[in-house]
Image: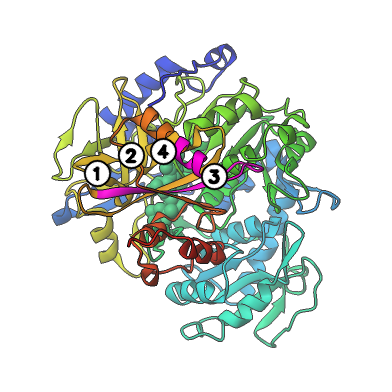
Amino acid sequence: MPRDIYPVPADFAVNTRVNREQYQALYKQSLDDPDGFWAGVAERLEWMKTPTKIKNTSFDLADFRIRWYEDGELNVSVNCLDRHLESRGDKTALIFEPDSPDTPAERISYRELHRRVCKLANALRALGIGKGDRVTIYLPMIPEAAIAMLACARIGAVHMVVFGGFAANSIADRVSDSGSKLIITADEGLRGGRKVKLKVNVDAALKLPGTNTVETVLVVRHTGAAVDMQMPRDRWYDAVVDGQPEACEPERMNAEDPLFILYTSGSTGKPKGVLHTTGGYLVYVSYTHETIFDLREDDVYWCTADVGWVTGHSYIVYGPLANGATSLIFEGVPNYPDMSRFWQVVDKHEVTTFYTAPTAIRALMREGEGPVKATSRKSLRLLGSVGEPINPEAWRWYHDVVGEGRCPIVDTWWQTENGGILISPLPGATDLKPGCATNPFFGVKPAIVDTNGNFIEGEGSGNLVITDSWPSQSRSIYGDHQRFIDTYFKTYPGTYFTGDGCRRDADGDYWITGRVDDVINVSGHRIGTAEVESALVSHDKVAEAAVVGFPHDLKGQGIYVYVTLIAGEVASDELRVELIRHVRAEIGPIASIDHLQWAPGLPKTRSGKIMRRILRKIAENAPDQLGDTSTLADPSVVDSLVKERYIPE
Ligand code: ATP
Ligand code: MG
């Protein structure tokens, strides 16, 4: 564990939402009196019926229930839109930055967004969509993606967003699992100057079995490409929406009514249709967004995730809009037209708060400081990270180079199933340690258990569990409640099992050490993948690394690593020896690498996470057992790794 500490900057310590003393007092209160605490927090929303029952939860299998605000009624779109019209009607709700910097950006005020959402909501009703119906959203990162989500929320339809990078099979699986009646898509998407044939993919998906629940496909004209329209199923979005009235009566929703279904990234296996509900979800995402990102009225907030992932749901759309913030939607990619694009967008829109993933940071770091230094970034005041453990080396680069040492980094740990951030620093309250997610958010009770389920107190490492419910917790896996119970609540009875490994240090801070399935057991010593990967990434010449275990006659498991070098560096046997030595020096002799394979690229999910289960099969010399690869971003990466794999004599 690195020892460097980055104290709360002076300006954050005084002028902040939550300072250190407040954090401690509020955290204690949130555990001592959850009902009182969360009743107070819920007042931030506008309820059609104020809840009187606050928390009604139990992880005990004999009496299992997760209910928050169960007699409350509200509408999410009213909270994200109508509520702001009086005080913030002309404030920019969404900034849309298109794929190409030459295409003009768009600024959509709260008033305009409200109008567009209401019109689409009316159109959906006219097409026979009502409360409880499922709607698939398969769109590029354009304003219509947020508009579609909010329009569903307005009429009580349950949205299911499919990331625009998925192809026909993945769309069909999700459409059929969710039983969607309608799909909202576009003619094409644009990513890094390339066209993504969204409508073609939908057409192909709807030829696959299980998709005949779909009655209507609404098609947004985005690039203007000619597409096949199959009447009467396919309808142009503008043709259906333009004539609709600008007012739309919002549906009264119970706090526990479903808001959306979202499939997980699929890093560990078949994606799960995670179900989220209305009241607790919105309370928690709006509160965490305001607190963790230390929201100020004039912030320009940019989360680079795709709305196809939970981060996009909670921290591009629902959290920020519930808070009346300005949220930036970016259609493009970090390296188009060049490696400075993120920072050019920051300068162009004077972004204050920037939230991205370690995979993007490592990719940018690989290209050196030049593309960053070519921009100003002086508007930035706060940085965030999510999706994977951030290697300390990448953290320092993000902090020192991107943020010029001025901006705290919130390393936010959470999962699709969590709805919102569970463990993270608060910028005005927490001293930062590179690679450390630090402290639980209010109301969150993390604990560490060993493999026998014994609680580990104080310093130590093991499996991360959460011992009590929080408001935005997933309520089920859609259509398979038993799988929900089995996956999360059976392993360590009475707790929610995260599947992640974790270490608590002497200060009580939490470090995520990687997925439990990925832990390597070398001669009885448990080694987290994150630790070895971070040691590799701390070497000057390494851009990215993935570490897995493989069966080893003497040690039980050996360490097999895949290494991607910094742009311009050349692989050699000397470098291999040097890296092996470097890791031993950093971690100790227990971390002796058995095989090091050069990797031009690593297999990743479409959200950019390293898929170690596939690398494990390659290391085990079992390339015919790779399992479900449908969520892989670039399958060709796997072929080349398989070809170059180490084959024991
Ligand atoms: P699946 O559940 O289908 O295997 P997934 O776990 O990748 O997919 P997500 O819900 O998108 O799907 O990701 C949550 C996981 O991402 C966490 O369990 C953790 O492993 C990792 N993660 C997210 N944020 C952080 C973070 N700040 N630090 C460390 N790990 C993180
Ligand atoms: Mg997961």
Quarter of the image with the C terminus in it: bottom left
Q: Contact, CB < 8 Å: mark 2 with mark 1?
A: yes
Q: Is residue 133 above or below residue 647?
A: below
Q: Secondary structure at mark 4?
A: helix
User: What is the CA distance from the residue labelled 1 to the residue labelled 4?
Assistant: 16 Å
Q: Nearer the viewer, mark 2 or mark 1?
A: 2
Q: Which residue is mark 2?
A: 592
Picture quadrant of residue 343: top right
Q: Contact, CB < 8 Å: mark 4 with mark 2?
A: yes
Residue 8: give x, y in percent of width and height.
Answer: 51, 16
Q: Nearer the viewer, mark 4 or mark 3?
A: 3
> Which one is earlier in the sequence, the residue at label 2 or at label 1?
1
Q: Which residues are magenta?
A: 557-578
Q: Amino acid at mark 2?
A: Ser
> Which one is earlier in the sequence, the residue at label 1 or at label 3?
1
Q: Which residue is mark 4?
A: 580
User: What is the CA distance from the residue labelled 3 to the residue labelled 2?
Assistant: 19 Å
Q: Secondary structure at mark 2?
A: loop
Q: Contact, CB < 8 Å: mark 3 with mark 2?
A: no
Q: Amino acid at mark 3?
A: Ser
User: What is the CA distance from the residue labelled 2 to the residue labelled 1?
Assistant: 9 Å
Q: Nearer the viewer, mark 1 or mark 3?
A: 3
User: What is the CA distance from the residue labelled 4 to the residue labelled 3?
Assistant: 13 Å
**Label 2, residues with CA under 10 Å away: few <14, some 14-19, many ≥20:** some
The circle drawn on residue 522 is: 1
Q: Secondary structure at mark 1?
A: strand
For the point 41% across and 19% down, which residue is it?
3
